[in-house]
Image: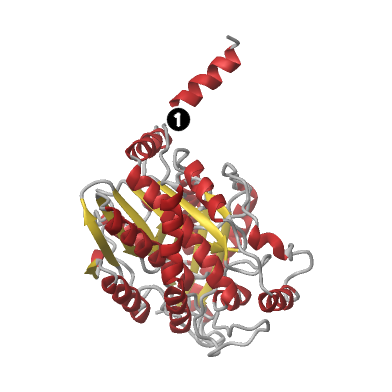
Amino acid sequence: MPLSLRTALVFFLAIPAIAQPTPADRTQILKLVDANAAQYKQVSKDIWGFAELGYHENKSSTLLQDQLKKAGFSLQAGVADEPTAFIASYGSGKPIIAILGEFDALPGLSQQAIATREAVVSGAPGHGCGHNLLGAGAALAAVAVKDYMADHHVVGTLRFYGTPAEEGGSGKVYMVRAGLFKDVDVVLQWHPADRNAVSNGGALAVTSARFTFHGVAAHAAMAPDRGRSALDAVMLMGNGIEFLREHVPANTRIHYIITKGGVAPNIVPDIAEIDLMARNPYNETLDGIWARIVKIANGAAMMTDTTVEIRNIGSDANIIPNDALAPVAQKNLEFVGGFKLDPAQTEFATSLQKTLPQGAAPSLDQTNIILPLRPFDPNAPSASTDVGDISWNVPTIGFGTATFVPGVAAHTWQAAASAGTSIGQDGMVIASKALALTAVDLFLTPSLVAAAQQDFHKQLQGKTYESAIPPTQKPLLNYRDND
């Protein structure tokens, strides 16, 4: 037998047999999602209207908890020192399969569900990342799986994790630290997007912090020599960051804003602040970049005779892939398929695409296409999520489904508008069905859970996980405040 054929045969035999639910089971699961879809579409609309910032998603969290309690889940609220975090559980024993839900909004992205820029409340938060859909869609999937488990007396534990403050608050990191995932076998997650695809690994590791410089105030004209400008230090730090960009890997991202720069131009600023985020596809690479950023901050303080305080540290890891779970997720997403825009949705989408940069509007058929499974490309554009920290501790697989008009990027008013429409809601249901099918696969196939665990340990071989968030730091419940 030729070596290549022998190698291929060994690889094939190493893949565990994956028992899928019967056709009747799969049909039932999809019907269970459809049975509750209208209810959870309304939940997504309600959360879209609440548009609450991280760690303050009180109405959103309470609504999801109420829905899950009514559906037969037991609730544990306020976990990990996070008032809006919760765990909803059903069943007992192994395996323990978890589904993640988020529900926080972004500052300044208030937007009506229309194709022109018009806020609901000027300057208020909005769901520019579609987390109103994320939490509601994950809950819809969990309820369908729970109903299937009850009907078929399936052994195991299903958990829904209500995870707050994904947008910069690293809520899941604290939940991991609290040991809330230590007994979980597999984690399933999804995220709104403008296309349908399985997310097997990826995302950018990110570290963020507020750099506060302290100087000495003085009259800027009469006695400038007595002053020590904290703003000078901030500007020097920013200048140093710009020079650093040439000497970091090309797939690194560094971005910042100046949150304090003084109170009046005739007063030497005695306090100034810069909020900075750095990202890279790999935790270990980012660690080295962050160390250089800290040196730049200390150097800026030294040059200006000021001091610097580094606080409000946030950190999300990159996502570890799982090659045992990915083909199962892909098969389920392809089974569910996408959805076609109806005439009203097409009219809205066409109008919204006109507001995008030239060349950024792909075909509207993208909502009905399932992209093939692809390996993670570390040089492709990406974002960050605290799902990464979970993936370093539990086998994790995810989906992205077309909830935004094709071509629309997250963290924009166009995304917030899409998330409040039927386009977002229909895409949400696609995700719910894929999640539900995959969860049932895991409950019915012990060999799949074992294979996921085996690949998890293989992926982590030679790697170590450590969050940049100090071990003593508690959740920063008011991390959005500038004071």
Residue at far bottom of view: 121
Q: Residue 183: where, in percent of width, then height?
A: 24, 48
Eyeballing the image, is 481 above or below 164?
below
Q: Is residue 377 left or right of residue 327?
A: right
Q: Residue furthest front?
A: 24
Which quadrant: the N terminus? top right
The image shows residue 149 at horizontal and vertical percentages of 30, 56
Residue closest to the eye, 9 or 228: 9
Disc tally is 1
Q: Is residue 457 above or below residue 441?
A: above
User: In what element is the residue under mark 1?
Assistant: loop
Instruction: Report the front residue among 85 and 31.
Output: 31
Q: Who is closer to the viewer here, 379 or 446?
A: 446
Within 10 angstroms of label 1, few (less than 14), some, or many (20 or more) residues?
Answer: few
Q: Position of residue 113 (x, y in %)?
A: 59, 83
Where is residue 175, by image quadrant?
bottom left
Confirm whether residue 388 shows in the render. Answer: no
Q: Quadrant of the C terminus?
A: bottom left
Camera-side residue: 260 or 163?
Answer: 163
Q: What percent of the width, then of the height, locates residue 142?
A: 36, 62
Tell me, yes or no, if residue 48 can be seen here.
yes
What's the coloring here? secondary structure
The residue labelled by disc 1 is: 15
Residue at the top extreme of this rendering = 1
Residue at point 54% right, 18% down?
A: 7
Residue drawn at (59%, 47%), measured in percent from left and top?
A: 248
Type of amino acid at the residue the image marks with label 1: Ile
Q: Is residue 71 left or right of residue 33?
A: left
